[in-house]
Image (cartoon, rainbow, N blue to C red):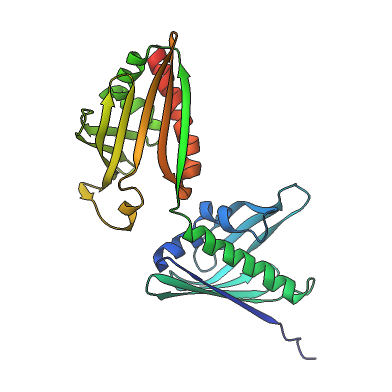
Amino acid sequence: METPTKTIIEIETAVNAPIQKVWQMWISEHDITKWNTASPDWHTTSAVIDLKPGGKFCYRMEAKDGSFGFDFSGVFNEVIPASYLDITLDDSRKMTVTFTAKGNTTHIAESFEAEDQNPHEMQRTGWQNILDNFRHYMENLHEQIGLHYEIKIDAAAQKVYETMIDQEKYRLWTTAFCPVSYYEGNWDKDSKISFIGEDHNGEKGGMIAKVAENIPAKFISLQYLGVLKGDQEVNTGEEVDVWKGSFENYTFKEEESATLLSIDLTGTKELEEFFNNAWPAALNILKDLSEN
């Protein structure tokens, strides 16, 4: 008896981004949970990848109302970084993903064996929606957004201001962003100042800014000029262009015996979740330092 021939469905898209960045976002467990959805009422709640031949992956996909969920999982048969993935899904169906660079655009082609439970056109539409969602996610990663955070601190504005910019206390309240964080330079108006972090391996990175304004205990404005990579200052290029010229503003408003500290800055979609977690944590540390 002949084995029934599997129907092969092919989908594709073109992403306006370099192939290395596309690859990084395709295999990033964190990023997969942001784009791997076929419709707004579904989401991927977790993603685990062991990216090597014989390694497994599992994406947990669930309806947002909690009514249903399933694991999309399988095994990598072949992995060619930034080029090709050959996969066997847990239901034994085969699929491949091919990445092709065309200048600063990346073409992605997926091919998969259709399953028998749902109409083929429905499967094509769902998988294409996921692929299109990835393209939209990639192309809007660096979209700039305004972010605002504030906290009420039971201390005079002068105390909050001095605590915030003090060399040693700065290292404490900014641990919410990076375990080792400090600045070099000073806070005088028109001065250059560098905000530096070190990862667990001691690798340095950070941001370079100009103090656009400093009215003690009232207002500080920083304008970003570039980034630090190790000991090297980088002032041009795609990574810098996302930030260059944007402002981070601190407003101190004294209310009786307390101070309302407000932070307004330009962020990106890519870092919105990180900032939404890190800034409130940092401000709470600053509050404790200022009140004690």
Residue 16 picture location, percent across and down: 45, 67
**Depth check, front residue: 216 or 198:** 216
The reply to whether residue 92 is visible in this rendering is no
Residue 186 picture location, percent across and down: 20, 29
Location of residue 288 by image quarter: top left
Q: Is residue 210 above or below residue 254?
A: below
> As drawn, is 91 to the left or to the right of 211?
right
**Depth check, front residue: 203 or 99:** 99
**Depth check, front residue: 269 or 28:** 269
Quarter of the rendering occupied by the C terminus = top left
Report the number of discs. Answer: 0
Q: Residue at x 41, y 68 (%)?
A: 19
Q: Residue at x 29, y 24 (%)?
A: 165
Q: Is residue 200 above or below residue 140?
A: above
Residue 239 picture location, percent across and down: 33, 54
**Depth check, front residue: 129 or 47:** 129
Location of residue 77 by image quarter: bottom right
Quarter of the rendering occupied by the N terminus = bottom right
Residue at the far top in the pictured view: 257
Q: Is residue 141 above or below residue 108?
A: above
> As drawn, is 207 to the left or to the right of 123?
left
The reply to whether residue 62 is visible in this rendering is yes
Residue 230 picture location, percent across and down: 24, 47
Q: Is residue 35 above or below residue 94?
A: above
Q: Residue at x 54, y 58 (%)?
A: 49
